[in-house]
């Protein structure tokens, strides 16, 4: 099965949704059995959101993910956060982890500055990888 989906970006503990300031977002997936390959992109050219919240996460995935298997979480390596107002927030060391913290259809961002607050300017998130669905 293959298709598209609309990713939603939020921040744990923050009120509202970053999607209200979105410029462009899209997602694509291929599912074979219980294996899901997905890619997503989310961009805002002037995002001000997330003050006081915790880590960023993407939700509205097209399927529920397997979140825990013998205490090992699934994750997608190589995802990133980019912002032109906080250059130190960019890092190739980010990962998107399926831990169920914000629901079974979410991926939580982990890495340096993953809790950075949006304070205007361009913000960009992306990820791509293979996960097991529940």
Image (cartoon, rainbow, N blue to C red):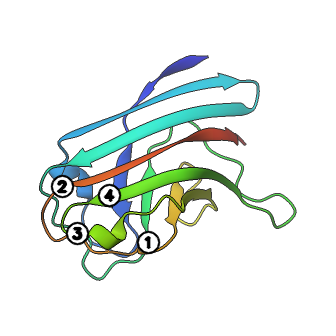
Check disc 3 and report its element: helix, strand or loop: loop
Q: Residue at x 52, y 69 (%)?
A: 111
The first of marks 1 and 3 along the sequence is 1
Query: Mark 4 and mark 1: span between their CA atoms?
Result: 15 Å
Which residue is under mark 1? 55
Q: Are marks 2 and 3 in contact (CB under 8 Å)?
A: no
Counting residues from the start of the chain, the first of labels 4 and 1 encountered is 1
The residue to which callout 3 is attached is 118
| Above or below for 32 versus 78 | above
Left or right of 70, for residue 3: left
- Please tell me how crowded label 4 is: few (under 14), some (14-19), or many (20+) other residues with Cα within 10 Å: some
User: Disc 2 or disc 1, which is closer to the eye?
Assistant: 2
Residues at discs 2 and 4 in contact (Cβ within 8 Å): yes
- Residue 108 position in % (x across, y down): 52, 61
Is residue 30 placed above or below 18 in the rendered structure? above
The residue carrying mark 4 is 82
Crowd rating for badge 3 (residues with CA inside 10 Å; few <14, some 14–19, many 20+) = some
């Amino acid at each position: 099965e293959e298709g598209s989906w609309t990713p939603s970006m939020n921040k744990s503990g923050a009120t509202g949704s970053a999607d209200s300031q979105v410029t462009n977002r899209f997602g694509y997936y291929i599912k074979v059995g219980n294996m899901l390959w997905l890619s997503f992109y989310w961009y805002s050219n002037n995002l001000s959101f997330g003050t006081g919240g915790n880590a960023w996460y993407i939700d509205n995935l097209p399927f529920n993910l397997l979140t825990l298997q013998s205490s090992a979480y699934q994750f997608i390596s190589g995802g990133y956060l980019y912002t032109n107002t906080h250059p130190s927030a960019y890092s190739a060391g980010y990962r998107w982890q399926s831990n169920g913290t914000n629901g079974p259809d979410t991926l939580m961002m982990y890495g340096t500055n993953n809790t950075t607050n949006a304070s205007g300017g361009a913000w960009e998130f992306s990820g791509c990888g293979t996960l097991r669905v529940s």
